[in-house]
Image: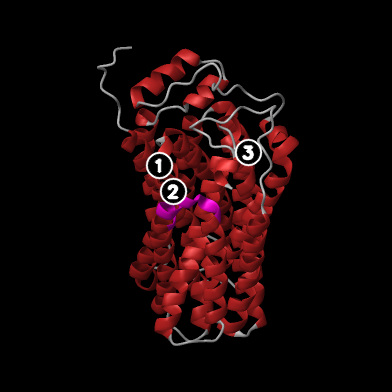
Amino acid sequence: MSSTLKRKSLLGVFLICWFGLLADGYDLYVYGATLPGLIGPEPFGVTPASAGMVGSLALVGMLLGSLVVGTLTDKLGRRRIFVGALALFSVAMLACAAAPSWETFAAFRFVACFGVGGLLPTAVALTNEFALPGRKSITLGAVLTGPAVGTVVASLSSLALLESHGFRPVYAIGAAGLLLVPFAWRALPESPSFLHATGRHAEAGRVEAAYGLVPATESTVRQRPAGSPLRTLLSGGYRRPTLMLWGITLLSLLTIFGVSTWLPQIMRTAGYGVGSSVSFLLCYSLGAVVGTVLASAVSQRTGPKPLVITGFASAAAALLLMSLNPPAAVIAVLAAVAGFGGLGTQNMINDYIAQFYPAAVRATGLGWALAIGRIGAIAGPTYGAFLVSFGGGVPVAATAFAIPALIGGALMLALRPSATPASAAQPSAAAPSAETVA
């Protein structure tokens, strides 16, 4: 191929992933932003208990989506999975907006979260592979602001529309992801590592040349591991860190989904109006955006692990301070810090996992970590519903959510990755070894 061939822009790949994750974040976190308008006699007679159950049921869909896609993406390819997941959850959001009953709403919410569960690991795997070797953390961090920005947009949409027009237009906006589908299908390239792993070396070489990636050599081509990708994750030197990463992700997502689902309603029970209650979720989301950008810049120098520990500690400290019931302005600041320690920390965990596993099993590794983590996400809304029903207001809820953050930080501190197993693919610039991310 001619050396004068004009290279395609890597920015296009990252923007497609970012916009996909923005839609992902909006569709995922809009539920918490609209709960103050859903709970009550109108429109469906929703109680806190049934709201918590639907929140958890939807996250079962996300768990299944992560499991299915986390396995299939290393078999079917990143591009088809990305586009399919985006289309699925966007259509389901439109169906939620038109739902005639709470049961129908819950069913389509389940479908939407199934699609959401499949997009994140695919987008992270693509971003990590196409990012320049010396800028992986900062590039991935920038792309991972997408879900947090989506949460901000969901909060703003709810603030603007929930009181005056109800929940339906807020969910209808979530269908805007359909606008990205044809563009992503046409412009998003397939992963070279997937193409190499499936024996399509010439096609992989064309993608590498088109985007200026370091060409794979015979010693760095990622062949499909012996057995299933999941077996690779649970064998040799990968087993212990994989299990620990699953536990860390579980605790992180329990905190995130418990707080993001119930923060507006908890603040409403503390005497704040609907608009003011949702504004605390907005502060939480903004803290996640700013925190992710700053943390990814630091992570480029230090690696993601110190940022994960710092994030967990920040979330726990902010939540414990919120338990003292300070003035509203202080709570807003603490919510922003908790946002960095929640969503921002999970983004750094995703960065760590993406750099830990070789490209041949990267999407599977991230997909399974997120799938196991969804157990915590499923528990979070139900845990929050119990706290709301139990009473005690902000102090009890904030303290209860600080506990899993503290445990998650302790586990990350104790994580000592083993050496990369000799049976797996050897590390390359595209996939740092375990020691690189320690």
What mark, if any, has residue 300 been given in the picture?
2
What mark, if any, has residue 68 been given in the picture?
3
What mark, if any, has residue 263 been given in the picture?
none
Residue 49 visible in this rendered orientation of the protein: no
Mark 3 is surrounded, within 10 Å at the Cα level, by few (under 14), some (14 to 19) or many (20 or more) other residues, namely some
Q: Marks 2 and 3: CB-CB under 8 Å?
A: no
Q: Marks 2 and 1: CB-CB under 8 Å?
A: yes
Frontmost of labels 2 and 3 is: 2
43 is within the stretch colored magenta: no
Instruction: Say which element carries label 1.
Output: helix
Specify whether 77 is left or right of 149. Answer: right
Tell me how far mark 2 sits from mark 3, CA to CA.
31 Å
In which image quadrant can residue 397 be found? bottom right
Q: Which one is in front, 401 or 412?
A: 412
The x and y percentages for residue 286 are 39, 65
Frontmost of labels 1 and 3 is: 1
Q: Amino acid at mark 1?
A: Arg
Dot 1 corresponds to which residue? 135
Tell me how far mark 1 sits from mark 3, CA to CA.
30 Å
Q: Earlier in the sequence, mark 2 or mark 3?
A: 3
> Where does the magenta region start and end?
295-305
The x and y percentages for residue 380 are 63, 64
Residue 263 higher or lower than 250, as above or below: below
In which image quadrant can residue 171 be found? bottom left
Q: Amino acid at mark 3?
A: Val
The x and y percentages for residue 362 are 57, 36
Instruction: Say which element carries label 2.
Output: helix
Report the magenta stretch's main SS: helix
